[in-house]
């Protein structure tokens, strides 16, 4: 499998303004290099994201049995569930998984893919949301196309608009639409949305679904109804505090992930609002721990492990497609005790 063009030792030497021999000795850790020259070489290698050929060669014998998995945050139970599915399939096929976390940084994601290409992974699975950024899409396509042409396999979880890759697509938009409709049927008319970053395609699709579901029921959301934060517990906590400070009168708070819902519930309780008596809260994903909350969280359930299993199977089955194949997985609204019919009460 050809890896396509990558940064060479010559590139590092040229950037550091040293000879090839000096660059090689510095990177190999020999003591026969002056400290100032070593620092220049190491700085140039880091700046250029250089992977030594010796490292790639050492991996080459086993590389055909190695797959790379890229996620945003391994501590997030959403990704843990997907990766568990990936690893189940990898284990059945005798594969070693190399895992990389990007912390939702688009540049880190590109660097991770470049490194996996250099290490000759036989397949790359992107489990995190794509970014709503045309320049990022072009850069990622430029990384993956030479890899695919050389025989590498690529699969992605969730919508990646311009990548010609096999895709496992959970119904984020339809699940969010169904949740919004369910909350309207429950009697809610005043909504707020606690949302992750809008430049992530998963978040964008879920927000679109919320808007569509409520608009179909005659409720239009305005920008004043949205409170954004990072896609984690602390982001949900901060966004809910902004909602409280804005004195928003929502009877139902829709969130774009379960972990954000956890932070939002904590913020609401600290402000003296009970869930669900004062305000209903919904999540998205159905990570395992939300069933054991008090009260259990109403959420949109996705088959997280199956997402990973399907993505890994697509990457390994050997079938090729010019545009990439898509497997769609449905979402399900699970009504639990964090949501109730809104009660009439006096304003505080």
Image (cartoon, rainbow, N blue to C red):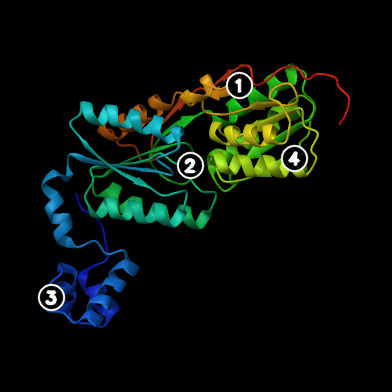
Give the image location of residue 53, x and y in percent. 17, 61
Picture residue at 48% right of the left edge, 25% below the top: 289
* In this rendering, position of residue 164 left or right of residue 59: right
| Discs 2/3, front | 3
Q: Quadrant of residue 251?
A: top right
Residue 31, labelled with which disc? 3
| Discs 1/3, front | 3
Badge 2 density bin: few <14, some 14–19, many ≥20, Cα 10 Å: many
Residue 244, labelled with which disc? 4
* In this rendering, position of residue 68 left or right of residue 202: left
* In this rendering, position of residue 134 left or right of residue 16: right
Badge 3 density bin: few <14, some 14–19, many ≥20, Cα 10 Å: few
Please report whichever mark, 1 or 2, sits nearer to the chain's N-terminal start.
Answer: 2
Question: Mark 2 and mark 3: span between their CA atoms?
Answer: 44 Å
Mark 3 lies on a secondary structure that is: loop
| Discs 2/4, front | 4
Identify residue for label 2. Answer: 129
Residue 71 seen from this side: yes
Question: Mark 1 and mark 4: span between their CA atoms?
Answer: 21 Å
Give the image location of residue 161, x and y in percent. 49, 43
Mark 4 lies on a secondary structure that is: helix
Asked whether 319 or 137 is in front, the reply is: 137
Please report whichever mark, 2 or 3, sits nearer to the chain's N-terminal start.
Answer: 3
Asked whether 172 or 31 is in front, the reply is: 31
Picture residue at 46% right of the left edge, 33% below the top: 78
Identify residue for label 1. Answer: 298
């Amino acid at each position: 499998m050809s890896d396509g063009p990558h940064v060479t030792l010559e590139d590092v030497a040229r950037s550091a303004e040293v000879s090839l021999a000096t660059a090689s000795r510095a990177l190999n850790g020999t003591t026969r290099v002056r400290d100032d020259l070593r620092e220049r070489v190491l700085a140039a290698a880091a700046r250029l994201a250089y992977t030594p050929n010796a490292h790639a060669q050492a991996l080459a014998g086993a590389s055909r049995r190695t797959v790379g998995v890229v996620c945003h945050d391994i501590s997030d139970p959403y990704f843990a569930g997907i990766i568990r599915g990936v690893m189940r399939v990898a284990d059945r096929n005798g594969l070693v998984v190399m895992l990389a976390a990007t912390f939702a940084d688009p540049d880190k994601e590109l660097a991770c893919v470049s490194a996996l290409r250099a290490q000759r992974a036989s397949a790359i699975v992107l489990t995190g949301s794509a970014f709503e950024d045309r320049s990022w899409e072009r850069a990622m396509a430029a990384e993956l196309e030479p890899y695919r042409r050389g025989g590498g396999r690529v699969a992605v979880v969730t919508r990646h608009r311009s990548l010609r890759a096999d895709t496992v697509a959970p119904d984020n938009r339809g699940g969010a639409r169904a949740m919004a409709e369910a909350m309207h049927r429950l009697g809610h008319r005043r909504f707020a949305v606690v949302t992750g970053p809008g430049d992530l395609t998963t978040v964008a699709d879920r927000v679109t679904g919320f808007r569509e579901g409520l608009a179909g029921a005659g409720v239009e959301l305005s920008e004043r109804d949205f409170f954004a934060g990072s896609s984690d517990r602390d982001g949900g906590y901060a966004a809910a505090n902004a909602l409280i400070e804005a004195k928003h009168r929502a009877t139902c708070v829709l969130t774009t992930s379960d972990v954000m819902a956890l932070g939002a519930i904590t913020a609401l309780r600290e402000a003296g609002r009970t869930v669900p008596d004062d305000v209903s809260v919904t999540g998205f994903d159905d990570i395992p721990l939300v069933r054991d909350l008090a009260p259990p969280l109403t959420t949109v359930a996705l088959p997280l492990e199956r997402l990973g299993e399907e993505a890994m199977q697509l990457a390994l089955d050997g079938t090729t497609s010019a545009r990439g194949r898509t497997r769609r997985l449905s979402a399900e609204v699970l009504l639990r005790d964090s949501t109730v019919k809104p009660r009439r009460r006096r304003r505080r």
